[in-house]
Amino acid sequence: VFFEGEDNGAGLPVFNGLPYTELSTFQNLENARIFGFELGYQQALDNLPAPFDGLIVGANYTYVDSETTFGGRSISLPGQSENVANAILGYDKGRLDLRAAVSYRDEFIDEIDLDGADRVALDHVQLDLTAKVDITDDIKFFADFKNVNDEAFEAARRYSEGDFLSQYEEYGYSIRAGFIWKN
């Protein structure tokens, strides 16, 4: 999208008093189709012999097929992964509550480009751990360990020749811990 206006002397157009080389804008898609389903399972395995009677398992899976047209081509809806899945293994018995969760999502279109080189956020897998311990009836200790596997965020411009890295961010892991006191 180009605006007629003044030139900054270096051959760059000026918009609102500032020179620019690239301009982004938002546009609504005229129509879209979306279909999907979600499956989930969660169970406390309290029928097992002690101490395994505190085990918890869970999983869910979501499939979404989406389609829209933009610039004469058919694409999936921006921001919509085709596959998303989570799995949880936990232990919850007495004063102890532990969880390990793995989350997965497929790539998705992050930005639509008029020339067809869309920006795509690539697949992501993350492991998180959580622990809670009731020390007394009034005091609880908690700890959250997020992104244990140190999964980076990656995005790429998708050209017909292949993907070209657009963004790579390493966040590392994070740990949050503390005590909760209720009176």
Image: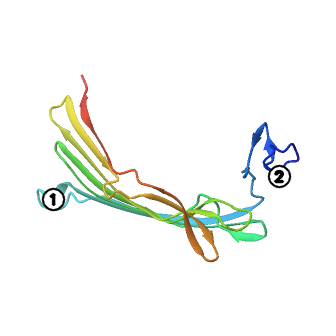
Taking 63 as reference, is 133 left or right? left
Which residue type does callout 2 highlight?
Phe
Mark identifier at residue 145: none
* Spot occupied by residue 66 in the image (x, y as percentages of width and height): 63, 66
Q: Secondary structure at mark 1?
A: helix
Give the alpha-carbon distance from disc 1 to disc 2, as whole Å: 66 Å
Furthest residue in direction left, as rendered:
50
Q: Nearer the viewer, mark 1 or mark 2?
A: 2
Q: Residues within 10 Å of mark 1 (few under 14, many from 20)?
A: some
Q: Residue at x 65, y 62 (%)?
A: 77
Furthest residue in direction front, as rendered:
9
Q: Secondary structure at mark 2?
A: loop
Mark identifier at residue 52: 1
Q: Work out which quarter of the rendered image holds the N terminus and state it.
A: bottom right
Foreground pick, 163 / 92: 163
Q: How many marks?
A: 2
Taking 38 as reference, is 89 left or right? left
Q: Residue at x 24, y 22 (%)?
A: 183
* Spot occupied by residue 165 in the image (x, y as percentages of width and height): 53, 64
Furthest residue in direction right, as rendered:
4
Q: Residue at x 27, y 52 (%)?
A: 99
Q: Which residue in the structure is indicated by mark 2?
A: 2
Q: Residue at x 74, y 47 (%)?
A: 20
| 95 vs 11: above or below | above
Q: Earlier in the sequence, mark 1 or mark 2?
A: 2
Taking 68 as reference, is 139 left or right? left
* Spot occupied by residue 95 in the image (x, y as percentages of width and height): 17, 42
Which residue type does callout 1 highlight?
Phe
Say whether marks 1 and 2 touch (CB < 8 Å). Answer: no
Q: Residues within 10 Å of mark 2 (few under 14, many from 20)?
A: few
When asked about the image quadrant of residue 17, the answer is top right
